[in-house]
Image (cartoon, helix red, strand yellow):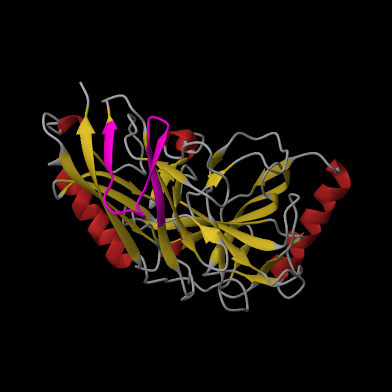
Amino acid sequence: MKRLLSVVLALVISCMLFSASLLFPLKRAPEITGYFGEYRGNSRNINYPEHFHMGMDYSTGSVVGLDLLSPDDSYLHQIYINHPIYGIGIALTLPEVTNILTNEKGINVIFAHVNEIGDTSSLAGRKLNDIYHQLISEFGDQYVEVTFDPRELPFRKSDVVAKSGNSGNVPPHLHIEVRDSTMQTIINPGFYFDTGNPTSAVEILDIRAGGKTYSFAQGKPTIEMSATTPLDLHAKVQLRHSVSPKTIELYVENSLVYQIDFVSFELDEADEVHEIYSSPSTESDYWFNLNARISLSVLPINIWDDIDWTNPRDARVVVRDHWGNEASKDFRIVMRR
């Protein structure tokens, strides 16, 4: 029954995925440069653990200072200054927007790597900008996080709330996160924001078991492994650059036994990235663990232990991107005792 509910929920969410409901905050066509749930390491030499990418990255055309618009009627929730990842960021509460996981009203949206908070085009924007500069003057390079009383600084849909930038030692871009009302559940922003319609290609490159890599170039490989052998898939989505797939599924004898699905995860799961990504994953090249022995939100289906491995089994892996494109490869598993 638990597996059936997981499948039904996944189907419902998949149907909703492309019905973006919020105003896109940039006055330019959306272009994804980093996908939700991707592997993130310490490439910028920051004192922060490896983690799942907690949002979606959008191109700003390599420029800074673009207006960032409130995606719906909102009020200020938090601001972050000198955050180890965000650089400078702003969190807005959208009280009338429905959480697609719970069907309850109220979500939070974070804009990160901004260069300026607030704007002179509205009363709330001017107040926010004054507060921001007062904090900069008082605390300098120290990390500052300020939480505001609900509705203290309200914004209307399309009000300018910040300026895009490159804070946090990154190239210019906009990082968008969606959180639930508690800020503890992190939701794929593609449920809410336009992700464009790019030309993409899903690539399944190799599969690896116990340190031995098998190529799909010669057809259907036979993989020998034991119950404790790691099974890893090398796959990615090619846009103008590489991003992570949304969904990876493993079928054994036509039954879905394992699914990685980047719909949401809990904040306290963010550091469990090595349970899903195997070495030598990078921020643009991905190896996925196909037999993790852990319970995570991004693993809605995991019934490896229910399979009878007495005889060799036919298997298929299916990889899908955010825009509905997919690729699949067949192989055979021989389980050694």
Is residue 84 shown to the viewer in this render? yes
Q: Position of residue 208 (x, y in %)?
A: 39, 39
Q: Position of residue 206 (x, y in %)?
A: 40, 48
The region drawn magenta spans 204-224
Is residue 34 shown to the viewer in this render? no
The relative height of residue 21 versus residue 272 in the rendered view (above or below) is below
* Image quadrant in which the C terminus is located: top left
Answer left or right for 250 relative to 158. Answer: left
**Secondary structure predominantly adopted by residues drawn in magenta:** strand
The relative height of residue 139 versus residue 76 in the rendered view (above or below) is above
Residue lying farthest to the bottom in this orientation: 28
Residue under the point 63% across and 73% down: 159
Answer left or right for 44 relative to 22. Answer: right
The relative height of residue 314 versus residue 104 in the rendered view (above or below) is above
Residue lying farthest to the top in this orientation: 337
Q: Position of residue 48 (x, y in %)?
A: 65, 35
Q: Quadrant of residue 85?
A: top right
87 and 102: which is toward the camera: 87
The relative height of residue 78 versus residue 69 in the rendered view (above or below) is above
7 and 254: which is toward the camera: 254
Residue lying farthest to the front in this orientation: 218
292 and 317: which is toward the camera: 317
190 falls in the magenta region: no
Q: Position of residue 311 (x, y in %)?
A: 11, 33
